[in-house]
Image: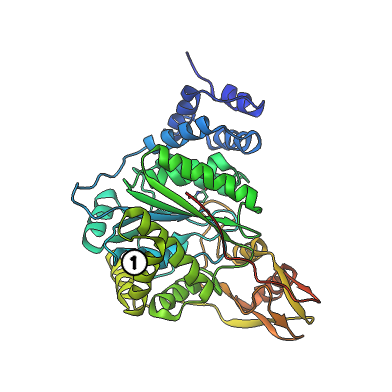
Amino acid sequence: MRMNISEIISKKRDGNSLSPDEISFAVREFTAERISDAQMAALAMAICIKDMNPEETACLTFEMLSSGETMHWPADSRPMVDKHSTGGIGDKVSLILAPLLACCGLSVPMISGRGLGPTGGTLDKLESIPGFNAELPLDEIRSIVEDFGCVITAASKTLAPADRKLYRLRDITGTVKSVPLITSSIMSKKLAEGLNALVLDVKCGTGAFMKSPEEATALAQSLVGTGKSMNVKTSALITDMNQPLGRMVGNAVEVNESMAALRGEGPKDLMEVTLALGGELMRLAGVAEDSNAGIATLAVKVSSGAGYEKFRHMIAAQGGDPDAKLAVADASEVLAEQAGFVSGIDAEQLGMAIIEMKGGRKQQGDKLDHSVGLEMLVRIGDKVEPSQPLVNLFAPDAMRKKIGEMIQSAIEFSDSPVAEPKLIIDKVT
Ligand code: URA
């Protein structure tokens, strides 16, 4: 039967399930550039609005995975593991965790993404390091993993190419927030890595695509179910994203904070989430008796400096200069205009402020300014006096007023004390 993409779009738009053949056709023809970006964006929008059932989601994931090659590792390789986040603000966990895991007898062939919507991208952050190459061919990915134990790179043209194309399109067409689209995007990349175990950080809150615990749980279940159906040991932590993770938000500033974290100077919340995800992954991979034992082993790799050295080696192996001083824009303070307790932070608005400063993209192909960013000086629950600095802003002079206003409007105050949000909300196994 001859298929037609506009009929497939209309079928989904009308709320019907798509058949495996229709999903296969859409992914295959889009990857081969016989379906236009406009048509695929329309299909993505129809999926966002009308959703997909678990069978359609599994089929979409499988087709996106099959759009490219899968990595195969020798039978005597160390366990292949990875961690992936659904996206947040100030989320630099991957930069810290990949080298730490590589110090613990595991291999981490991490395929990461660029910024998506208001959330920052691991690759954009790493590209603030002069010379760093995030676009490695498959044989180089393989040899860096074999030599150093970890690599952080983009989905190459041959690895999950359908996601590479669709991810960029979703970023600029309002089609990010969808359980089936996020599931297939993440899992197609992860399954292409030839993993034994995978831990997912499903972010929940103002700076996440999933704003409520219910939405985050639905996404976590979809991701974990898809991983297991493909024989990869998978679990998910649902973690708070009602304020940036750590203090820094941006590209160069987040690399600096990650390197400090690997030297044992990381903020408490960032370290707690990083180690919890790593401990869970070590349990899944069978190299730790339970996640607490994994956390203890990872903590030693921080205090010994082994993780920091591993990170430097990985950067150098990917062409980057680990000694380079990263350019950061001049700092100025954003001051509190009132007294009170910080009761809420619109983390998404902070992500939009970074995009406004060109630290993220408004359009496909936008060139980034890696030097802009911000440092949070307050967290939810903190008591603040008038004129107290709330944020250190790293921005060009001309942007300071506008971005300062965006930051002011993102932070809410209350007269009465406010409890700190719980950082690790739930676990889905
Ligand atoms: N991360 C991804 O790789 N894809 C998504 O769709 C969301 C987060």
Q: Nearer the viewer, residue 297 or 162?
A: 297
Residue designated by label 1: 99
Residue type at tag 1: Pro
Image x and y of residue 425, in percent: 58, 59
Is residue 135 something that shows in the picture?
no
Tell me residue 34's x, y (percent).
Answer: 46, 29
Please rate how many residues cluster around mark 1, counting C-alpha atoms within 10 Å: few if below 14, some from 14 to 19, many from 20: many
- Residue 122 in the image: state x and y as whole percent: 46, 61
Residue drawn at x 79%, y 73% is 414
Q: Is residue 1 left or right of residue 77?
A: right
344 or 350, nearer to the observer = 344
Q: Give the color scheme: rainbow, by chain, secondary structure or one colour.
A: rainbow
Q: Is mark 1 within 8 Å of ligand 1?
A: no
Q: Quadrant of residue 146?
A: bottom left
Residue extending farthest front:
289
Give the answer, above or below, for where 189 lies relative to 251: above
For this view, does 113 lie left or right of residue 355? left
The percent position of residue 395, horizontal first and vertical second, equals 60, 75
Residue drawn where x is 46% and y is 31% of the image: 59
74 with respect to 53 (left or right): left
Residue 159 showing in the rendered view: yes
- Residue 197 position (above or below residue 24): below
**Which residue is nearer to you in this view: 414 or 142?**
414
Residue 70 sits in which quadrant? Answer: top left
The residue shown at (50%, 30%) is: 55
* Mark 1 secondary-structure assignment: helix
Q: How many marks?
A: 1
